[in-house]
Image (cartoon, helix red, strand yellow):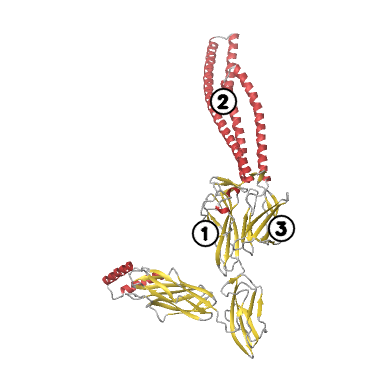
Amino acid sequence: MAKKFTIGLVALLVLFSPLGRADFRALAQENEDGERQGDGASLSLSPSSGTFIVNNTFDVSIILNTNGRSVNAVDAILKFPPDKLQVVSPSLGKSVIGIWATPPTFNNQNGTLRFQGGIPSPGINTSSGVISTITFRVRSIGTATVNLSDESKVFLNDGLGTNVLTNKSGGIYNLMLPPPAGPTVVSPTHPDQTKWVTNTTVIFEWSGEEGATGYSYMLNEEPVSTPDDISEGSNAGVAYKNLQDGTHYFHIKALKGNFWGGITHYAVRIDATPPAEFKIDISPAARTTSKLPIIDFFTTDNLSGIDHYEMKIIPLNPENIGTEFSTESFFIETQGRYIPPKELELGDYDIIVRAYDVAGNVREVVQRLNIVNPFFSTSEEGLGIAGKFVIPWIYVFITIITLILLLMYSLWIVLRIHRTTKVRELEGVLKDPTIQERLKYLKEKQKAYSKAGSSIQLLVLIVAGAILLSGFLAPFLKAAEFSPLVPPTITTISKNITNDQLFYIGGTTEITGAEVTIYLQNLQDNQVFSATVISDEKGEWFYTHKEPLISGKYFLWTQLKIGNELSPPGPQNEITVSRTAIQLGASRISYETLYLLFAIILFLIALILGVLNFYHYYQARGKQSRLMKEIREAEEAIKRGFATLQHDITQELVVIHQMRLTKTLSKEEEEKEKQLLHDLREISEYVKKEVTDIEKTM
């Protein structure tokens, strides 16, 4: 809306100005030449800095510099922190704006202020034109940053509404409490009034004034407040415990004789809440084939704000020891996005990110990263395909075994068809007695083979069932988790540890450069392993074991050493290292490797069964085609033979019938007639039966 109004305003100014169109074109050309000669227009705040007192007001002006060009419209948007400042009034008394599109609008809840206006043609060319002066009231202490929004615009007087704003300068203002007018107050727990502190217990101390007989004080959330006229006593200090997060103000005045003196105000800022929970997003995915994943993370803090992030990439596979990411150094400071400086090796990693707020609270998040083989990968969860998704092992086994059973059933059907077709082919074509004897022998062998085949199929089913059962009974033990304990403080520890992954642990101490000893006791053989690391300049320490631990249960504790002095051992904590599968000396065979091996065996079985199905189906189809061809030829031959035989018998019967017309048939002739009729009927029935059988076979 602002842009449409501004363009329209510019158009009206052009149409109703004394300049003609030719003069306007000349002016536009002049402005274009000026744009090539200098920088664009700029908006700035004056003053750009200063120190101001809570509850007082101060003025800030928006200054326009056109840098030698003529502009005719301005759209300025100001942003300020509403918790520290509020607009009292935007003044229009002195302004280079000649026509206001709308009155200046401000919102003290969102912290925004907007000016929209124009200058009649030929516009204005100025180096320090005041657009408006804003009066702010100080609400609370701190640093207030006032900025001009990127949506702000300054339009050139060229008839096109060209935005020539290239520079914007905001202001930074220091906001303070009124100077002490009463007792001098200090806080040993919160010495700096401008800093956020995690301590929720606040101690105030003040110096007793000469002649003071009592003090009245109060603690609230108002920057400036007046205590009542009731004395709290003559003590020179007070403590407040378990204060809520936020900014609190202490107000105190002294009683001298019968008169109360001036008031001193003191601010404390408490933030004991860690930053908000957040997730670590890994692109393209947490399980990926990319060796340069993009690691993104972001969070917020309600009070003091986010100060910085720290991150560490911890390799979990022994073969990745010695890489850049397996050094003993702890976290590195980073921004909300991190790309490894070099490619990661295949394997598992733990990404640990810590978000610190300004007060020093920390939120730690751990995300597992799996760099997998580009084609497939295996894990305790299942079979990874192309690094994009994982098929659980149970579904892999069920699918392959179901396929094997279907192929076995299909092979059984195809073998029956193949055997039947082959036998029918031999029976229908080979009539030689020697071949028939061989055929009988072959049938007996096929019958024996059929029984052996059933035994083989049963054995395959038993083996497949055993493999599937092993998938169900495979133990999936998870590593035990334990809470961080002191001394020293344990803040980071590897989770879901198995005996093919590296163990790591980290934490903090109150003393830099101290020796931290980590003890691990194997509960199976009671052997104790120890390792020592040195805390860094921040008091942080970190240790990664050089090789995977043997599966079993362990006691874990830590101890601090400074010179020859040792701290008491920390409490013992039990952790569990789960078995990956089989361990033979130093060699380990993981469950996922076994699962992959079983899956490959089942796949090969399925492949062999598929090949056998195809082979026997192809062979049976060829034999069936040849048999059908021979059956059709036999049918035609039978039909021709039947026609010839019927014709001969009919001719004989015709001759006998003619003889019956001329004379009486002899006994032999009558017998011959009966025999011919009987043979005709018998042959007809036989041929009819053969044709029916052929049709059924086909």
User: Which quadrant of the figure has residue 300?
Assistant: bottom right
Classify mark 3: helix, strand or loop. Answer: loop
Q: In which quarter of the image is the C terminus?
A: top right
As displayed, is residue 58 above or below residue 398?
below
Label number found at residue 337: 1
- Which badge, 2 or 3, is on the more N-terminal residue? 3
- Judged left or right of residue 56, residue 245 is right
Disc 2 + disc 1, Cβ < 8 Å: no
* In front: label 2 or label 3: 3
Spatial CA span between label 3 and label 1: 38 Å
Q: What residue type is labelled 1?
A: Arg
Q: Which residue is drawn at 60% across and 33% down?
A: 411
Percent position (x, y) of residue 542?
62, 57
Label number found at residue 310: none
The residue identified by callout 3 is 572
Classify mark 2: helix, strand or loop. Answer: helix
- Which badge, 3 or 1, is on the more N-terminal residue? 1
Spatial CA span between label 2 and label 1: 80 Å
Asked whether 110 or 205 is in front, the reply is: 205
The residue identified by callout 2 is 694
Structural crowding at the residue carrying mark 3, measured as other residues with C-alpha within 10 Å and reported as few (<14), some (14–19) or many (≥20): some
As displayed, is residue 462 above or below residue 658?
below
Q: What residue type is labelled 2?
A: Ile
- Which badge, 2 or 1, is on the more N-terminal residue? 1
